[in-house]
Image: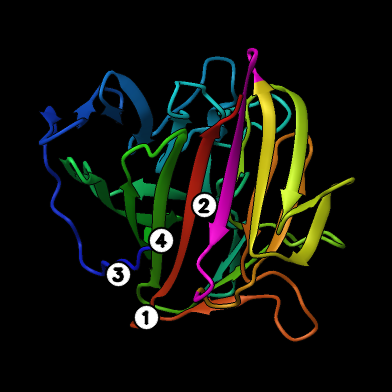
């Protein structure tokens, strides 16, 4: 996996029209959305502004995630605001338990803490790929508690595969912030997550093993979901950087259409991570989208 530089400084808000030096082009399409195209096809959209789907509850409004995402041939593989889990949002990162100053918040489902973008992300495009850099904040009760840096690198399509490298960095601002996964027995989801679109013929795999049932808390290097979307077969694999803190991660894998690399997961010794001012946490992943015959 490509090693990337950790970005720990605020990025200026810039206006984006269309920017391209090669086959890639970024365009602000309005509504707080940045679209990336490779050639004549959309690759993905980064939502830096708050989004709310018609019919979804107002308290599920959110920003700072990726949706939609497409395979090289244009298959849309992810979902946003699914009615069974309105809080699920394409490719995203969050935790159900966020504690600071003796109070507990939720940036996962109930949004008692929320993402807030500092401005329009900085973007670049060239023949070698496209890059997005965003600075976001986690806000709770009117104050910022965590600074979040997102760096996303989209590589040119190779054969039938598009690779997206995602680097996420979080740092507590004025006092420690504790992150925990779900407190439900036998689970610990929270971290990088993907929610998949309606499909048929779902197959879940992890580390080369075909799963016969949903899975939690098992350490895995990678996980993937293969399925048929509108008659077109595709597979999406998420591979964690082996140098991530806590790797190999435990995973939350669901046949209804969910893959999550849990951090810090839950073991006898570790079930939380404390973010401290001046000590950022960085996690890196590769998301690979492949069209299949």
The residue tagged 4 is 168
Give x and y (percent) for residue 63: 41, 39
Q: Do the residues labelled 4 and 2 touch (CB within 8 Å)?
A: yes
The chief SS type of the magenta part is strand
* C-alpha gap between disc 1 and disc 3: 16 Å
Nearer the observer, 119 or 77: 77
Q: Which residue is drawn at 38% across and 76% down?
A: 280
Of badges 1 and 2, nearer the viewer stands: 2
Counting residues from the start of the chain, the first of labels 1 and 2 encountered is: 2
* Res 59 → quadrant: top right
User: Any mark on residue 6, and which?
Assistant: 3
In the rendered image, residue 115, in percent from the top left (x then y), is placed at 42, 49
Residue assigned mark 1:
277
Q: Do the residues labelled 1 and 4 touch (CB within 8 Å)?
A: no
Residue 239 located within the stretch drawn in magenta = yes
Name the disc covering residue 93, or none. 2
Q: Which of marks 4 and 3 is nearer the N terminus?
A: 3
Whether residue 107 can be seen here: no
Measure the alpha-carbon separation of dots 4 and 3.
8 Å
What range of the chain is rendered magenta?
229-243
Report the Cα–Cα distance between label 2 and label 3. Answer: 17 Å
Rendering coords of residue 190 (x, y %) = 63, 58
Q: Earlier in the sequence, mark 4 or mark 2?
A: 2
How packed mark 3 is, by other alpha carbons closer than 10 Å (few <14, some 14-19, many 20 or more), is some
Q: Distance between the residues labelled 4 and 2?
A: 9 Å
């Amino acid at each position: 996996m490509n090693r990337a530089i950790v970005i720990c400084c605020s990025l200026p808000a810039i206006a984006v029209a269309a920017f391209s030096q090669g086959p890639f082009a970024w365009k602000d399409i309005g509504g707080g959305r940045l679209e990336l195209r490779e050639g004549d096809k959309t690759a993905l959209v980064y939502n830096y502004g708050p989004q709310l789907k018609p019919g979804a509850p107002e308290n599920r409004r959110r920003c700072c995630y990726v949706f939609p995402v497409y395979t090289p041939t244009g298959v849309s593989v992810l979902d946003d605001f699914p009615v069974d889990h309105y809080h699920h949002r394409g490719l995203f990162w969050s935790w159900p338990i966020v504690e600071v100053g003796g109070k507990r918040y939720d940036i996962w489902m109930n949004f008692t803490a929320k993402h807030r973008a500092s401005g329009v992300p900085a973007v670049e495009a060239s023949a070698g790929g496209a890059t997005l850099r965003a600075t976001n904040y986690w806000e709770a009760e009117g104050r910022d508690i965590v600074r979040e840096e997102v760096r996303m690198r989209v590589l040119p399509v190779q054969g039938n595969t598009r690779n997206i490298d995602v680097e996420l960095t979080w740092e507590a601002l004025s006092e420690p912030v504790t992150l925990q996964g779900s407190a439900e027995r036998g689970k610990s989801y929270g971290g990088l997550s993907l929610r998949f679109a309606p499909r048929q013929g779902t197959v879940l795999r992890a580390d080369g093993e075909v799963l016969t049932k949903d899975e939690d808390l098992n350490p895995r290097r990678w996980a993937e979901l293969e399925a048929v979307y509108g008659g077109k077969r595709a597979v999406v694999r998420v591979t964690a950087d082996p140098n991530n803190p806590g790797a190999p991660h435990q995973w939350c894998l669901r046949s209804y259409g969910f893959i999550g690399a849990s951090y810090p997961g839950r073991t006898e010794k570790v079930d939380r991570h404390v973010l401290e001012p001046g000590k950022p946490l960085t996690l890196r992943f590769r998301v690979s989208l492949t069209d299949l015959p």
